[in-house]
Amino acid sequence: MIGQAAKLWAEAIESVIDGEFDVLTKADAAQLRQDAAEAPDGTRIVTLYDRTDHQRATPLLVLTVGKTDDVTIDARQLRKFLAQ
């Protein structure tokens, strides 16, 4: 009886994993991370808005973040943001 219950649990877990997830080895995951880090243009733009600006019409601050998570900002924007 206990062996049968364990078998049913194992089959249920396998079904969930197979149906909902893709399983990667640690080596595959590390390779994906490395490939993403070596992307030619790993920059992204982060735009900050006031929470009351529902239309997102007036950005408070725009940050350019590089692959190394270094942030580049226009000093005029920073002064304007800090003056508010």
Image: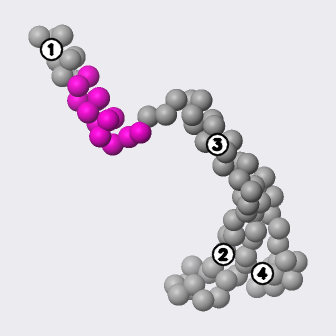
Q: Is residue 79 left or right of residue 44?
A: right
- Say which element carries label 3: helix
Please report contact status of discs 1 and 2: CB closer than 8 Å, yes or no.
no
Name the quadrant containing residue 53: bottom right
Image disc number at residue 33:
3
- Give the Cα separation between the discs numbered 4 and 2: 10 Å
Residue 43: where, in percent of width, then height?
A: 73, 62
> Magenta segment range?
10-22
Look at the magenta stretch and give its main secondary structure. Answer: helix
What residue does disc 1 label? Answer: 4
Quadrant, the N terminus: top left
Query: Which element is circle 4 on?
Result: helix
- Distance between mark 3 and mark 4 Cα atoms: 34 Å
Q: Nearer the viewer, mark 4 or mark 2?
A: 2
Is residue 79 visible in the rendered structure shown here?
no
Mark 1: give few (<14), some (14-19) or many (20+) Cα within 10 Å: few
Three-letter code for the amino acid on which mark 2 is drawn:
Leu
Sequence-first tag of 3 and 4: 3
**First in sequence: mark 1 vs mark 2:** 1
Q: Nearer the viewer, residue 76 or 44?
A: 44
Mark 2 or mark 3, whichever is nearer to me: 3
Q: Residue furthest front?
A: 40
Residue 46 place in picture, x, y as percent: 67, 69
Residue 48's label in the rendered image is: 2
In magenta segment, residue 68: no
Tag 3: amino acid: Arg
Q: CA distance from mark 1 to mark 3?
A: 41 Å
State which tag comes first along the sequence, 4 or 1. Answer: 1
Q: Residue at x 52, y 84 (%)?
A: 54
- Residue at the image position 57 percent from the left and 79 percent from the top: 51
Left or right? Give the position of 20 relative to 82.
left
